Image: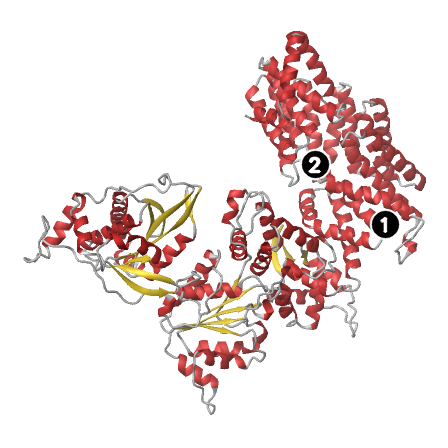
Amino acid sequence: MDLKKDNSVSIHNPQSYSSVDTLTLMFTDIEGSTLLWEALGDEIMMGVLNTHNTILRTANSAWGGTEIGSEGDALFFAFPTASAAVMCALEIQLVLNTYQWHENIETFRVRIGIHTGDMMLLDDKYHGMPANLTKRITDAGHGGQILLSAVTHELVKAQFPLGSFVSLGEHRLKNIQHPEAIFQFLAPRASILKITGEERWQEVFSKKAQENTSQNEKSGDFVSIPKLQTEFPPLKTVNNSPNNLPVPINSFIGRDTEVRRIGRYFSDGRVRLVTLTGPGGIGKTRLALQVATELHDVYPDGVWFIALADLRQPAHVITEIATVLALALKPTQDVMEQVVSHLSGKTLLLVLDNFEHLMEASEDVKTLLLRCSTLHCLTTSREPLKIAGEQRFIVPPLSIPSEDVDYEALHHYESVQLFLARAEVVAPDFQLTTDNAKAIGAICRMVDGLSLAIELTAARVRAMTPQHILDRLKILLDSSLSSKPATLLSTSDRDVPARHQTLNAVIDWSYKLLELEERLLLCQLAFFSGGFFLEAAETICSSVCVQTEQDLPYTETIDHIFNLHDKSLLMTEEYLTRTRYRLPVPLQLYLREKQQPTGFREAHAHYYLTLAQEQDRKLEGPEQNDTLSEMAIELDNFRAVFGFAQENNEWLLFGQLAVALSKFFYIHGLWTEGLGWLKQAEAELPQRLGEHQGLEDTSEMNEMSVQVTIAELRVALATFYNEQQECETARQLCENALQVFRTVGQQLGVVKALNCLGIIARYEKKLKEADAHFTEALEIAKVLGDKWYTSSVLNNLGITAYNRRHFEAAKLHYTESLRIARELGDKLGIAYALNNLGKTANQQGLREEAQRYYTESLRLTRDFSTSNVGLPYLLDSLGRVALRHGKHEEARHYYTESLEYRKENGNPREIADSLYQFGQLAHAEGEFEQSLCLFLKVASIYAETDATTSFYADAVNNAIKALAAELGSEKVEKLKFEMEAQTLEEIVNMCLS
């Protein structure tokens, strides 16, 4: 038989099981494969591995199995029946045992584990706990051994001769919550004869048998019957290794990468002390226990867990270690000397849990490591021990899904897996569904993937739906200052340590270990929302005097922040090459409930108002893109300022912030939120003008500053209203603002109001009025030397000239606007001017020139990390250039991308603009009925949304009239009926297809 022929079943084409099947799994693993690679070299070992794979896959195919995966040299198979899996395993061991391996291989042995359970087929891959148990059973075995779970043994024991199996007792397996009974298959003679009679293996068995001929052993064509080993050392399970590892009451979820990485630190021999750091509740202890369980067979003298949480004196650490190691301490001798004497020459691992409050004892750990050369230590702590040779490992939160993750993919995220596992403990029928998936994902994001927080929230499913839990969490997290106790994150279970009774207890335990200055600073940092950069913390916290008995001012803020980060109470992320700090959400909740630092929120509000105003000005220059990103990052802090201003009737501050952020909200596409803040400010501020309510310094509430802020609010509001076709409302707001600006002599405000009034007039097709506003605005802007508004107004003058079809005049205005925008580095201004130059060139029949302008404008617009404002219009423009020159497929490409953006944004009027382009394309391709259907739908949407001033409104009506005249009234009525029967979504999907 040719063993080089690969008869495997593809992993990507599993047999047609249903979505959930009861399968028997068989996992294999080569014993000592690493040593074989080193001894044989890559070339020989690759040949050996190929032969091994062929033997396993041939047997698997013969017994009706399916290969479902691999990991290194380990292969995984699934069988429809348990007996087939056992016979396949026996055949593999027989062939491996009798095959002629390379002369440098003394033994080549594979361990095999078998278990039966329910598996779920998802995306052509099997998922489920039975796979984990099968792997753990396999890992416990030795080369040549076939191990079965109790479930599989129960299924097959009657199908094999008596004495075919032997019980190896119950064993604790890695990452398995309960002890498992394990059985060994002893390879009975009858089963061996059944396999050795197979023709496909006769050559292999005969060749090996001839070398071991025995005259008194004959069976058919075989000179002798192969024998398999039946006696092995004790299983490699936790039971058979010296340890005191506590048995976890819950299964371990996720963190496979972390477990492997930490384990490699020790197995590579480079590191002897690893410290797991992270905030309370992130899962340091559970991860350390899992790593220790995985490594138990690496340490012949044991793995020992030393709980330090209840210790209060550093000197007690060495005594606790001695106690755990069961040393009979002699009172007349030094404890350290006795522990060193006991550990010398032993290879073992100490797990020192919760070390942070006993840092002075790090010297004892250092002494043990120096004097006991084969000792390894794994510690958990908020901060590193800072011992030479220490390897710090920052424990990350569990992986969390983003908002747009599909329902089917949620299972892959560790935080969701943990939530579901813990929820099923208290509600056995609980499962992930399409109804609760979004809420569960949001809960995991809201608590930052912190293990303890997830476990405590999941426990609430016994009485609350995930949506209800999410709503309660939002009440706590959305408030700038929560006065409600976080009772949601608590548990009454008596078997949980006291400091884990509530998440607050965990945090309180960590909080009380801090120095006074650190505690006070941490309370301040809790009132940042969405994190902070170092400059913000330094400016705000250093300027605040926290009211304590000593009236302690803040100094050395940065040093304290670094210390808090070292103690895992602050998390860091990289944004735009800068480090941003934030507190885990549960810690933030705890601190906000604890106390409100006097003066902090006011200082926070004024800092972020100033920042918003500075960033607003930067939006006019070369730093636009980075500034937009920075403003987006700080959005939660800006929202916190709005909240503070509302609570304290600081409406002037509220209005000034709304004005400063209005351009950001507009460009970033956050229109609903921007409008909300602007409308609230514009409604409240005039009412408060004569009241001075809630203001400590009423001198700041002077008439001019308030009137100017109100006027600026109204211009900003007018910009949004105009874009929503509410031109009359926008006009009234702007005219009122213009009057105020003229009265107080605020010339830049006059320019803003005139420019906005010109845009409104242009939308209303009052081009003469628009020109008058723009001309006056341009004159004032030039006198003021404000280049940004000069460029903007020139661009608007160009548009009115274009609308009059005065293309050369329009081109002059656009060109001058572009020149100034390039001088300022105003990328958005450059993009707008280029777009308009492209439109003009296209109307003049200058296709190449138009395409050049549009392409550069499109490139600049794509660079902005915003909600693609303006991008669909540019794509439409490029499509029209292509269509004008008969390039239909190129036009379709641009129109399709434009419609996809608009479909995502969901604005019906803008979707109608895209449908108009597809109507034009259909008409150009001679599809007149389809073209008319699209134009009718566009006209219908324009009417429903009162968008009669759309750029395409007149063109649509003219096109409908022309097509109606050509097709006839009867056809028009029929098409109109068909159009009305189709939903907007159906028509959009037709265009996109």
Q: Judge whether 335 appears above or below 517 on screen.
A: below
Task: Identify the residue shown where x is 74% and y is 53%.
Answer: 640
Please rate how many residues cluster around mark 2, counting C-alpha atoms within 10 Å: few if below 14, some from 14 to 19, many from 20.
many
**In this picture, residue 402 sits left or right of residue 472:** left
> In which quadrant is the C terminus drawn?
top right
Q: Give the x, y percent position of residue 963.
A: 66, 11
Observer able to see residue 99: no
Q: Which residue is mark 2?
A: 828
Q: Earlier in the sequence, mark 2 or mark 1?
A: 1
Q: Can you say which quadrant of the picture contains the N terminus?
A: top left
As shown in the figure, which amino acid type bears the numbered disc 2? Leu
Q: Position of residue 253 (x, y in %)?
A: 49, 57
Residue 901 higher or lower than 58, as above or below: above
Amino acid type, mark 1: Leu
Q: Which residue ends up furthest to the left in the rendered image?
A: 215
| Image disc number at residue 652 | 1
- Residue situated furthest front in the rendering: 158
Residue occupying the point 38% across, 47% down: 22
How many marks can you see?
A: 2
Left or right of 585, for residue 783: right
